Image (cartoon, coloured by chain):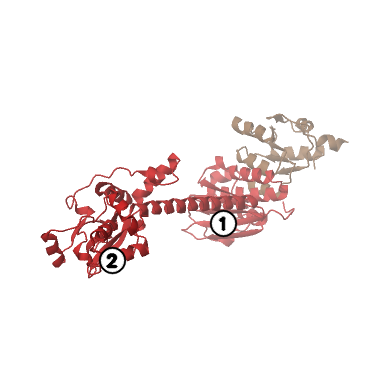
């Protein structure tokens, strides 16, 4: 029961002290992938996951939409340009930002049950 | 075509006012001298004025005489044709000829046999005169039908050149009022005879031929379109600029849209998109710019990426995962993982790459659309 709640997107917000950059839908995450290399994400990420990265460039959206990634969480308080956020909303990709480091974020998400 | 007039109708025919080339009988001594000396009085259409004169373009011919020209568009097309076509395209060739020593009776038989109304007369292959049907009627009338031709033929001959345009020929018919012109080539050799009827027939044939060509072309185009449609073939060319990270991803977006609209499985769609994206970013990061051609049909999607250089020094090394020559900017943006080419190869059902340092790189990859795989 706890697991299921933890994999739902809005609930995870509080776990990693994240702030939503786009509208968030109540959605189940299929897992998580962490990488700052776009090709690595293209090669290894599964569809429907949460992608944690410090990359805030437009190409993150290209990769995310190609891999049908549900949401992207930017760490270290990084936020993309408003134009990128607008494009994400258009593409239906949810964006979040957390002040935590990638390591802290990973630990908290794992602990909360997102596997 | 002008028809020969039967002898029985000679009187009626003789009353016809139509002026024909070579009608006037030469009875003067001067003319006979000319015959004896075999001096043809050839006056080609070109030399009626001065040798180098720029003759004003003759007025547009009376095209309403040409059949089936009801529509305005066809009329202008026929007008175009008379400027384009040459006398040699319309004339009757080789011409039916006779020699100066033949009798007028034999010319009459020739006209009846070939249904023609005028015969050029040659002496040793040189045009020396012309006999029209009216000359024959007069000969029958006056009882000299058995005389040799040279005694009665017309020597004042207006000729046309075989390279004249038909519009020029029509103007000459209007100017002289003759029923026919002998046609000479550049060497003054008689190569044919042209009548107004010949021009009409030629125009009709040309119109018919071009209409058939247009229909055939239209049919071929339709067939290509139908084949493309049947194969669901779509091709697009994408120019990729060096360093243009902002545009990266647009091509793969488009590919996904096309494939999604065709109901292609998400896995296949994703592999095709990844190939396009990696190929595109490779050109952006590593080359001076290039082009990606994407062809999608019902069987497969083929992506061909060609750049202008500088080429890959060691392709085997570039194919190894983690090996990258990307610069700091690209790496900062999350590129340069050294996974681009391996990713493409992993996603492709067919893959090839050729590159040489100092030249360009040519990459080709294909994904079969019918095969469902879960590679990625």
Nearer the camera: disc 1 or disc 2: 2
Helix, strand or loop at mark 1: strand
Q: Which residue is mark 2?
A: B105
Which chain identifier belongs to the brown chain? A
Asked whether residue B95 appears in the rendered view, the answer is no
In this rendering, the count of numbered labels is: 2
Label number found at residue B363: 1
Q: Residue at x 75, y 31 (%)?
A: A25
Judging from the image, mark 1 belongs to the subunit labelled B
- B92 vs B252, nearest the viewer: B92
Q: CA distance from mark 1 to mark 2?
A: 83 Å
Q: Is residue B118 above or below residue B78?
A: below
Residue B174 rendering spot, x and y as whole percentages: 28, 46
Residue B181 rendering spot, x and y as whole percentages: 28, 56
Q: Is residue B360 above or below residue A12?
A: below
Residue A43 rendering spot, x and y as whole percentages: 68, 50
Quarter placement of the N terminus of chain B:
bottom left
Label number found at residue A29: none
- A64 vs B73, nearest the viewer: B73
Judging from the image, mark 2 belongs to the subunit labelled B
Quadrant of residue A63 within the rendered picture = top right
Asked whether residue B266 appears in the rendered view, the answer is yes
Residue B264 rendering spot, x and y as whole percentages: 71, 48
Whether tag 1 and tag 2 are in contact, CB under 8 A, the answer is no
Q: Residue at x 16, y 65 (%)?
A: B35
Looking at marks 1 and 2 on the same chain, the residue that comes earlier in the sequence is marked by 2
Question: For chain B, what colour was chosen?
Answer: red
Helix, strand or loop at mark 2: helix
> Does B107 sit left or right of B243 as displayed?
left
Q: Residue at x 49, y 50 (%)?
A: B214
């Amino acid at each position: 029961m706890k697991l299921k709640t933890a994999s739902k997107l809005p609930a995870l917000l509080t776990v990693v002290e994240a702030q939503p950059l786009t509208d968030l839908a109540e959605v189940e995450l299929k897992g998580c992938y962490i990488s700052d290399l776009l090709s690595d994400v293209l090669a290894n990420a599964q569809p429907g996951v949460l992608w944690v990265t410090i990359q805030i460039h437009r190409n993150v959206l290209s990769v995310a939409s190609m891999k049908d990634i549900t949401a992207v969480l930017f760490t270290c308080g990084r936020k993309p340009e408003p134009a990128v956020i607008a494009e994400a909303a258009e593409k239906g990709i949810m964006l979040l930002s957390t002040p935590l480091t990638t390591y802290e974020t990973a630990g908290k998400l794992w602990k909360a049950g997102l596997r | 075509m002008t028809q020969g007039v039967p002898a029985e109708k000679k009187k009626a025919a003789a009353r016809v006012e139509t002026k024909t080339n070579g009608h006037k009988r030469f009875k003067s001594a001067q003319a006979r001298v000319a015959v004896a000396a075999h001096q043809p009085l050839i006056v080609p259409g070109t030399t009626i004025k001065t040798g180098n004169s720029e003759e004003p373009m003759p007025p547009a011919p009376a095209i309403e005489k040409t059949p089936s020209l009801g529509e305005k568009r066809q009329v202008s097309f026929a007008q175009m044709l008379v400027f384009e076509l040459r006398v040699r395209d319309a004339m009757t060739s080789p011409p039916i000829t006779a020699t100066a020593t033949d009798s007028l009776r034999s010319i009459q038989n020739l006209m009846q046999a070939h249904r023609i109304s005028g015969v050029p007369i040659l002496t040793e292959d040189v045009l020396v005169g012309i006999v029209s049907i009216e000359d024959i009627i007069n000969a029958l009338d006056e009882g000299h039908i058995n005389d040799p031709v040279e005694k009665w033929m017309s020597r004042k001959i207006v000729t046309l050149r075989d390279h004249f345009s038909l519009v020029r020929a029509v103007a000459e018919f209007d100017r002289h009022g003759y029923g026919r012109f002998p046609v000479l080539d550049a060497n003054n050799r008689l190569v044919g005879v042209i009548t107004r009827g010949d021009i009409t027939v030629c125009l009709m044939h040309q119109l018919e031929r071009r209409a058939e060509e247009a229909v055939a072309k239209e049919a071929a185009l339709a067939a290509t379109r139908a084949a493309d449609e049947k194969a669901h073939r779509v091709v697009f060319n994408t120019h990729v600029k060096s360093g243009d990270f902002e545009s990266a991803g647009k091509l793969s977006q488009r590919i996904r849209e096309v494939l999604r609209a065709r109901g292609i499985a998400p896995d296949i769609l994703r592999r095709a998109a990844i190939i396009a994206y990696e190929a595109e970013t490779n050109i952006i990061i590593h080359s001076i710019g290039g082009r990606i051609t994407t062809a999608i049909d019902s069987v497969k999607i083929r992506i061909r990426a060609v750049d202008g250089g500088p080429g890959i020094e060691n392709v085997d090394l570039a194919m190894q995962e983690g090996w990258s020559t990307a610069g700091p900017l690209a790496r900062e943006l999350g590129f340069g993982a050294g996974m681009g080419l391996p990713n493409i190869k992993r996603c492709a059902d067919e893959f090839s790459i050729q590159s040489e340092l100092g030249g360009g790189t040519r990459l080709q990859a294909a994904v079969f659309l019918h095969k469902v795989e879960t590679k990625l």
